[in-house]
Image: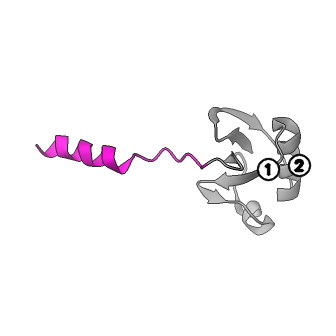
Amino acid sequence: FKVCNNKQKDKKLGVAAISLEKLREKIEEKFKIENFDLYFNGVLINDDNYFESIPNQSVITIVEDGDVLKTGEIEPALLKHSIDVLFF
């Protein structure tokens, strides 16, 4: 997998793991963090069944406790403003 921290998505680290537990262990070791959630395409990875369905080489995002997942979505206020500009 290509693993990145929610705070620095441009820096990815390759991590191979056969289970969610092993992936979490390797992330704790390599990123020096303990309390975090893992997301794939904005969806929380919380069990091995879902983990096993994720394709190889996928990007997995680490979100440390207290942080909010950054999705790259456009703020609704900005979207409205952009639409107003397009139609006027």
Residue 74 position in % (x across, y down): 40, 46
Please indicate, yes or no, whether residue 19 appears anywhere in the rendered image. no
Q: CA distance from mark 2 to mark 1?
A: 11 Å
Q: Nearer the viewer, residue 76 or 20?
A: 76
Residue type at mark 2: give it: Glu
The residue most toward the front is 66
Residue at x-position 89% and y-position 53%: 22
Which residue is under mark 1? 35
> Is 24 on the left or on the right of 3, as rendered?
right
Residue 67 position in % (x across, y down): 64, 47
Quadrant containing the C terminus in the rendered view: top left
Please indicate, yes or no, whether residue 20 appears anywhere in the rendered image. yes
Quadrant containing the N terminus in the rendered view: top right
The residue most toward the bottom is 49
Q: Secondary structure at mark 1?
A: loop
Q: Secondary structure at mark 2?
A: helix
Which residues are drawn in magenta? 68-88
Please name the colour scheme applied to the rendered image.
Answer: one colour
Residue at x-position 60% and y-position 49%: 68
The residue most toward the left is 88
Which residue is under mark 2? 25
Residue 7 position in % (x across, y down): 64, 37
Disc number for residue 72: none
Residue 15 position in % (x across, y down): 81, 42
Quarter of the image for residue 54 reads bottom right
